[in-house]
Image (cartoon, rainbow, N blue to C red):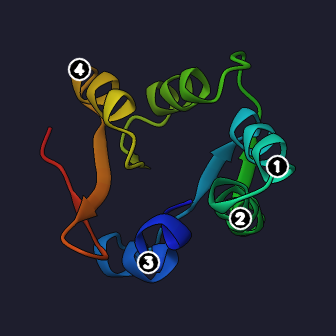
Amino acid sequence: MMPVECGVRVFEELDRLVTDPDPVVPRAVVAELENLSEGAGEEATAASVGRDLAERCRVVETHERYADDAVVELARREFDGYVVTNDAPLRERLAERGVRVICLRGANTLAVTER
């Protein structure tokens, strides 16, 4: 949802930050984006764009149905991966587990947080 909410060109930023990225998204995240995109307003628009961008990612199954929990589960399985999120509570959960997070730094630039 960052492209709409923050003006971030997510895949261009990933290419800048990570060598040979392999974008992966939990199915629970795609489902949440689909649900949010059915509404009206800026959040629905952002979710619709996020859903479209998710089509450029490999969608994977997790045991978790709630999107944030699915992201944490997937991050545990991908030991050397990154998670792209601007959600502060999720970033905190991931940091507690030693997961590298890519989040917004500045107006429309992403950066990797330290472990």
Question: What is the number of the mark on residue 2?
Answer: none
Q: CA distance from mark 4 to mark 1?
A: 33 Å
Residue that mark 4 sits on: 96
* Kind of residue at disc 2: Thr
Q: Is residue 14 above or below residue 24?
A: below
Question: What is the number of the mark on residue 7?
Answer: 3
* Kind of residue at disc 4: Glu
* Quadrant that contains the N terminus: bottom right
Judge from the rendering whether residue 16 lies leftward or rightward of residue 44; answer left or right: left
Residue situated in front as seen by the camera: 94 or 89? 89
Residue that mark 2 sits on: 45
Residue that mark 1 sits on: 39
Q: CA distance from mark 2 to mark 3?
A: 13 Å
The earlier-in-sequence mark between 2 and 3 is 3
Viewer-side label of 3, 4: 3
* Quadrant that contains the C terminus: top left
Q: Position of residue 37 (x, y in %)?
A: 80, 53
Residue displayed at 24% across by 29% down: 95
The crowding category of the residue bearing disc 2, from other C-alpha atoms within 10 Å (few below 14, some 14 to 19, many at least 20), is: some
Q: Is residue 23 above or below residue 17?
A: above
Q: Position of residue 42 (x, y in %)?
A: 63, 61
Viewer-side label of 4, 2: 2
Q: CA distance from mark 4 to mark 2?
A: 31 Å
